[in-house]
Image (spheres, rainbow, N blue to C red):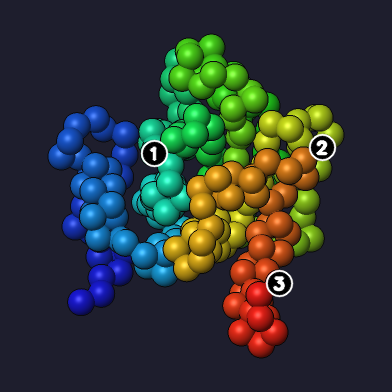
Amino acid sequence: MSITLQQILALTGKLDDTPGLETPRERFRRFIHDNVTNVGEVRDYIEECLRTSGDQYSRALQDLVNHVRHFWGFTVTFGRYQGVRGQVGFDGHWQSPSGFDLVIEVKTSETYAIRTATLTNYVDTLISGRQIPDWDHALGLYVVGRPDPDIHQLENAITAERRPHQLRIISVESLLSLAELMNEYDVSHHDTLSVLRPSRPTIDPIVDLRSCFKTLTPIVSARYGSY
């Protein structure tokens, strides 16, 4: 029996930063960890978040994006839904078994100006606290729910502030596509990291090329043999 995100949220309760193992946020996170086991289900729930306004859905979006790290092979430290003074305000801290870290910021869109210094400061703070070794082993990653091809505000800001070696941008759709490639083809965790590291801030064009390659390779091999 399928269950909608609206029904799940009604059962778990209002998502907030109240600590404790039996709080709504922990019940929600346990539910998606235990029951949302394929990328298609995550996509359906994320699309429901992007269609619906309100804090409940923006917070669910944050948790669902963090859930994708499971398919990528990362562990996660969940961030707060709402920032408070004195605490690092990242949305997620993904840790690779290889020793590489991603600090995640989830944005529904990039319509409004985004200060890239905020995300780099999160990484700097984690480095200062020895939770990340250094910038050579980390990236700040913006995950954008509804990218607009006519708006390049975030990419332009990263370039203008000379942070292309520190920050990356990926759409939710490309994030999910990479997860699908790992499930359906022989794409390793190391391969996924290699997609994130090129110097261009926006990752989507690279993901599109890899998707085309992985789709065409079995067709070419079947028709013409391996090469």
Amino acid carrying label 1: it is Thr
What is the spatial separation of the Cα atoms under label 1 and label 3, in whole angstroms? 37 Å
Split into 4 quadrants, where in the image is the C terminus? bottom right
Amino acid carrying label 2: it is Thr
Residue 31: percent from left, percent from top: 23, 54
Amino acid carrying label 3: it is Tyr
The residue singled out by tag 1 in the image is 75
The residue singled out by tag 3 in the image is 227
Question: Looking at the image, do the residues carrying marks 2 and 1 touch, with CB atoms under 8 Å apart?
Answer: no
Mark 2 or 1, which is nearer the eye?
1
What is the spatial separation of the Cα atoms under label 3 and label 2, in whole angstroms? 39 Å
Mark 1 or 3, which is nearer the eye?
3
Q: Secondary structure at mark 2?
A: helix
Label 3 crowd (10 A; few <14 / some 14-19 / many >=20) = few
Q: Quadrant of residue 175?
A: bottom right
Split into 4 quadrants, where in the image is the N terminus? bottom left
User: Which is nearer the N-term, disc 3 or disc 2?
Assistant: 2
The image shows residue 201, relative to residue 39, as above or below, that is above
Residue 159 is tagged as: 2
**Depth check, front residue: 213 or 119:** 213
What is the spatial separation of the Cα atoms under label 2 and label 1, in whole angstroms? 29 Å
Label 1 crowd (10 A; few <14 / some 14-19 / many >=20) = some
User: Which is nearer the N-term, disc 2 or disc 1?
Assistant: 1
Residue 207 is tagged as: none
